[in-house]
Image (tube, rainbow, N blue to C red):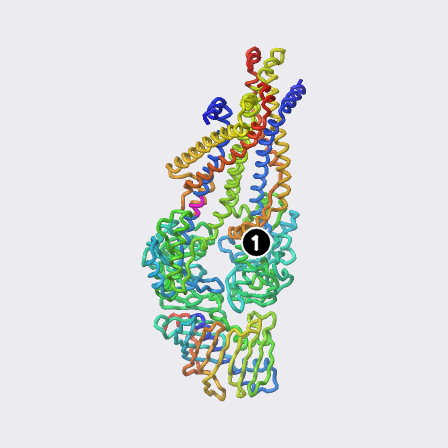
Amino acid sequence: MKQAWRHLWRNRRRSILTLVAVFIPVLILVLELGMLNGEQESLFRNTVTFETGHFQIRSSTERADGGALTLMKDPAAALAVVDSVPGIAWRTMRLDLPAMISNGGRSQGVLLQGVVPEEVGHVSPIGRLITDGEYLSTGSRGVVLGGELRDLLAASVGTELVLLGVHPDTGIGAASVPVLGVYAAPDPAMGRGVVQVDLGLAQTLARRPGAVTSIVGFVEGVEGPWDQAKVERVVADLRAKLPKEYKVLDYNELAPELKTFQTVEKPFHVMAMGIFFILGGLVVLNTLFLSVVERTHELGVILALGAARRRVMQMVMTEAFLLALVGAVAGLLAGVGLVAWAQAGGGLKLPGAYDEMARMIGMEAILQLRVSVSELVASGLAMIGVALLAAWFPARRAAALEPVEAMRHVN
Amino acid sequence: MRGNTMRMAWRGLWRHPRRTILMVLMVAFASLVIIVMWGVMDGFMASMVDSQIAVDQGSVKIHAAGYDDDPAPEHGLTAEAVSDAENALAAASFSDYAPRLSVYGVVKSAYAATGMEIRGIDLAREPKVTTLPAQIAQGRGLANSGEILLSEETARRLDVRLGERVVLLAQADSGPQSLAVTAVGFYGSGIPNLDKNLVLIALADAQRLAVSQGATEVVLSLPRTQNAEDVAAKLRAQLGDSFVVKSYFEANPMLASLIQGARIEMIPIFFILALLAGFGVANTVLFSVLERTREFGVMIAVGMSPKRLGRMVQLEALLASALGFVVGGSVGYLLLLLLTRGMSIGTTWASMAGDISMPAMLYARASGIYLLGSFAVVLLTALFAAWYPARRAAGLQPVEAIRDT
Amino acid sequence: MNKLCKTAVFLALLLLASAVGSSFAAAQGLTPFQVVDRVRDQWQGTSFHCVVSLDVTQAGETRSYKVEVWSQGDEYGLLRFLAPEADAGSGYLTIGDDVWYYAPAAGKAISLPGFAMGDSLFGSGPALDDLLHGTLSDKYGAEVVLDGTDYVITLTPLPDSPVVYGSLVVRVRDDFALLSIVYNDQRGEVLRTATFSDYIMKDGRALPTLMTIEERNGDLTVERLESPEFGIAIDPAIFTVENLEAGQ
């Protein structure tokens, strides 16, 4: 072993090159993983916070035409179960129903979301994108609509509009309320089609006081998609305890694009990084090969003196292993260091187009970088593995030398 | 003299074939990866965009001014506006265009009803513009008035079978309108958003439903070789303010910047690949220079100019890289050509991809640009790799060199 | 609620349609279409007023309503809720193709796009509409057979008719009282059955005052007419938006 170190030290330049060939792929993989995890987390957080929650409880009977969600007339039973299951951080309720909104002669069909404002105001994209007026507060009698809809109805903050809830099961509920606020929608279809009101008002419009279409829940201690097991446990618990007329959906079922990221995009990007590993392996192969060539004479002597061929091979492999180990560890440390540095600054700021996109959903274009210990270990081991594989050929060559000929080799 | 140097360099390389092969391998790998990655990435993006354009959106769309703010038939193109637009297109020698009338209405079966986009298409001309009317999964395409083409998903949702009648309901200025149509076929678009929200009928039927003689848009299809933005600009100038003309990318600006972003992200990757390969080449060439110190010393002592020696070393590095590029580049390009025929991304991936509206077949693009780009990268690598060893060689002191064994 | 309103209007039209049956007595030997034409001529401008009580059973739950209906021919109709409390004062007004809805909570009447309610107002209406508006011959083919002492009229929509049904089977008693209407889908299966009973005699015609509509999925609507009045003079001011908004 000491011999190996000595030799490596003696050929500093080549050792350094091999180190670099191991270091770079590992570093790049760590950074890429950091970004991928950050993206996944970002996607997770946006979807879960704004749209789906960690899980939702809905009525198990679905409408054939998929138009409106079935009403849960009396969610008290379901709520009692939810409150009795451990591990749930908080929950809120929603009532979504198709509605008509009109100002005098102008009317539009919209999707009306009844929410509990104090619970969702700060996380709902609508709450974050108010440009005019203000957002809802509990018990408020008013509606928040998109800029596009406001223009279509020729209304403004304060205009009294008529809302008609049109749930296919319950008929028409009506109310006349003012515009409380206007939001800037990320896309015009949403701005034209989605309005929010207080849950109580929505229930009036659905003509079923106390009814909701879904209970949205958040599980304790879930920071990112890696905490999926926690959510699954709570969901299983709920499924066991809830009566049959309810069904529980977790965020993966509510937002299949999250699963796709995990199973399609992430592996794809990681495999792409494999290219660097291969090239790094080739470079390792190259340098080790040269190293063996350089030492032909020396190796010949060693063999002539009676050393086992296997020992020679081991020697080369050990050198390779040491280099790979140092290079991989250095790469991991550098990667972790960079990630930590970026995180210390609050995350990676994304450029240009990403900034615009993020702002449209009311978020900042910052990517949090995260790497898990298991990912780090796996990356390091993978590269060491590749390096060892690359070392095998030169090592075999070294072991296969003819001592006499080898000794004749002059540099 | 040049030729001589070249020959010396070449011979020098092949004195140690295995080493040279390794160098070539490294450069070949880097070149191949750059070409294939670039082609696949571009092709991938293009596949997604092209599939939208080819299946449904068309290359350029002409709307009436004000339509985008409130997309309803009453804000669409009047019959005159439609013929003005079509005349302008014909005058510019375009032939693949067609008018459409889209109205939001209810599609009703005996069991369920749901609101969606009801699009009336010109049965003769639309197939030249988009492929959706021909993407039949069951039954047949539209051939006459009184027929409707639904997606398989919609047919499932409303429980409609082939040959059954459905009723379309829409609200026109003059009052509610209803129309009976027969489901002659079900389509599969490969784009989930379309499947969920679109049904196709004959233009005349849509006009009856919307009580209109005009259309809501005129759609133009262009071959890939033509720049859609240029065409849109020209049409815009010609048609004036009462029309809004947009190419697909102009109508979807986010997409364009996303694609650009992806392209830019690739650049550091290519450079790092080149760097690694360059390191490998440099190392080998340097090793061989050091190995030949004595030999070089003799050559200089005998009268060879150090600079020429340096150039020879450089040539060695360049030749190895060039060889690597030729090998890697050709294999890479061939691979791309193969992939342009389409990579099916497998059924499990395809069903998941459907959720994020990725088409199930991805095409790579094979273009000379990738070869050029890869070549440029490799060239840089080679020059960089050659620099240090060449300096070393050129700076050798003959006596010391000979003495140094 | 939608089903409710639909059935109330449906009922109003239905009662007038029962005249089809009774006209057979007067017009044997004419084709069904000719009979309808005669009926239309006869009933043009006929007015109708009634209080209707409805029990709507949906998904196992039953709700009861009481509405007051006025209708003038096929042009005008007003429906106002009397009970339950939550709905009292709200109502619908139809003038030709236009529909207005009013609820005290809304403060003013709103014009509705007829189809936006989905299946609601005119769900099964059009089929009956056709019987009344005399477009029957344009939209349906008809056959009559005798079954015991009952007449069975099978109406099959013509291919271009904007009707989702496969066929309607109307059963009429020998004294031309309407017994039932069965709605079939295009696969020959029953979608909905309307049965009529509790006839009262009015000008020699038997008019049903109890109608039960049963859907395939088990949903049930039971309508009871209380003291119907026909051919009375109705103040045209009743069919105005102002009156709708008056809520009384």
Q: Which residue is denoted by mark 1 in the rendering?
A: B190
Along the line of sight, the residue nearer the viewer: C15 or A272: A272
Residue A157 higher or lower than B43, as above or below: below
Q: Quadrant of the N terminus of chain C?
A: bottom left
Q: Is A42 within the magenta? A: yes
Residue C204 image offset from top left, x and y in percent? 49, 89
| Residue drawn at 61 percent across, 27 percent down | B20
Q: Quadrant of residue C146?
A: bottom right
Q: Which residues are magenta?
A: A39-43
Residue type, label 1: Gly
Q: Secondary structure at mark 1?
A: loop
Residue C239 visible in the current orientation: yes
Residue A53 higher or lower than B394, as above or below: below
Q: Would residue A65 appear left or right of A198 to someone viewing this image? A: right
Q: Would residue A314 appear left or right of A137 to someone viewing this image? A: right
Residue B65 higher or lower than C221, as above or below: above
State how many labels appear: 1
Along the line of sight, the residue nearer the viewer: B359 or A258: A258
Name the residue furthest front.
Answer: A306
Q: Quadrant of the C terminus of chain C?
A: bottom left
Q: Main secondary structure of the magenta part?
A: helix
Binning the other alpha carbons within 10 Å of mark 1 as few (below 14), some (14 to 19) or many (20 upward) gives: many
Q: Is B250 within the magenta? A: no
Residue A17 image offset from top left, x and y in percent? 50, 27
Residue A54 image offset from top left, x and y in percent? 40, 53
